[in-house]
């Protein structure tokens, strides 16, 4: 994945996702931590997105992840917010709490601080799920400053949605 995605490249990717979702009559929900709603912003910048976008939830704190997405306190305590287990619960929770048929969730460390041993700045977990299917999660290790990590996160999340919706 290229290290820098400008807004136009992200919008193009979001438009492709939208066309694919609309063609398959799928509604999308997003659950975002480190991207802070950026995926939802790229989507809602597209006129007519209400035909395929249900909702977006930005859940940064442990409490918000629990209340909005149903992430179990034990998951956060045992594995932390930036983990495969947490993103799988986030993406599943996004579908439970919405009317969507497909969801994406992201959690990570965008920096410049917050890195931990084994979880350096740039570590991002992304999860995808279609209603009725098992969720999938991948870990990414992005380079660059906070903006670059977040842009790469949005791009990877959208690319995964495009693959899942195709």
Image (cartoon, grey):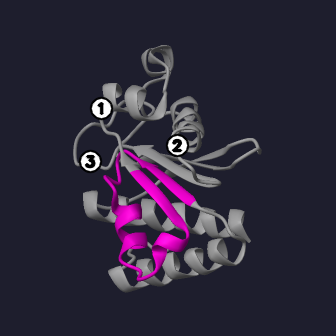
Q: Which residues are magenta?
A: 28-56
Q: Marks 2 and 1: in contact by CB < 8 Å?
A: no
Q: Which quadrant of the structure image shows residue 132?
A: top right
- Name the residue at 36% across, 59% down: 149
Q: Quadrant of the C terminus?
A: bottom right
Task: Return the x and y of residue 72 as percentages of the image width and height.
Answer: 49, 20
Residue 111, numbered circle: 3
The nearer-to-camera label among 1 and 2 is 2
* Disc 3 element: loop
The tag earlier along the polypeptide, 3 or 1, is 1
**Is residue 113 one of those drawn in magenta?**
no
* Disc 2 element: helix
Q: Which quadrant of the structure image shows residue 66?
A: top left
Residue 94, numbered circle: 2
Q: Kindly identify which residue carries mark 1.
A: 61
Say which of 100 and 147 sits in front.
100
How far apart are labels 3 and 1 at the CA level? 16 Å
How far apart are labels 1 and 2 at the CA level? 16 Å
The tag earlier along the polypeptide, 2 or 3, is 2
- Name the residue at 38% across, 75% down: 4
The nearer-to-camera label among 3 and 1 is 1
Q: Tag 2: Cα neighbours inside 10 Å, few (<14), some, or many (≥20)? A: many
- How many labels sit on residues? 3
Q: Marks 3 and 2: in contact by CB < 8 Å?
A: no
- Name the residue at 51% across, 37% down: 90
Q: Marks 1 and 3: in contact by CB < 8 Å?
A: no
Say which of 120 and 52 sits in front.
52
């Amino acid at each position: 994945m290229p290290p820098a995605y400008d807004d136009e490249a992200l919008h193009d990717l979001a438009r492709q996702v939208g066309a694919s979702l609309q063609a398959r009559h799928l509604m999308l929900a997003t659950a975002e931590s480190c991207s802070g709603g950026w995926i939802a912003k790229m989507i809602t910048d597209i006129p007519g997105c209400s035909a395929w976008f249900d909702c977006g939830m930005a859940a940064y704190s442990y409490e918000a992840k629990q209340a909005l997405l149903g992430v179990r306190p034990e998951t956060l305590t045992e594995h932390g917010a930036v983990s495969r287990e947490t993103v799988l619960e986030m993406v599943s929770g996004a579908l439970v709490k919405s009317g969507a048929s497909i969801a994406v969730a992201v959690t990570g460390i965008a920096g410049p601080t917050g890195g931990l041993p084994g979880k350096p700045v740039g570590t991002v977990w992304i999860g995808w799920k279609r209603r009725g299917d098992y969720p999938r999660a991948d870990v990414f290790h992005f380079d660059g400053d906070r903006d670059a990590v977040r842009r790469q996160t949005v791009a990877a999340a959208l690319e995964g949605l495009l693959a899942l919706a195709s």
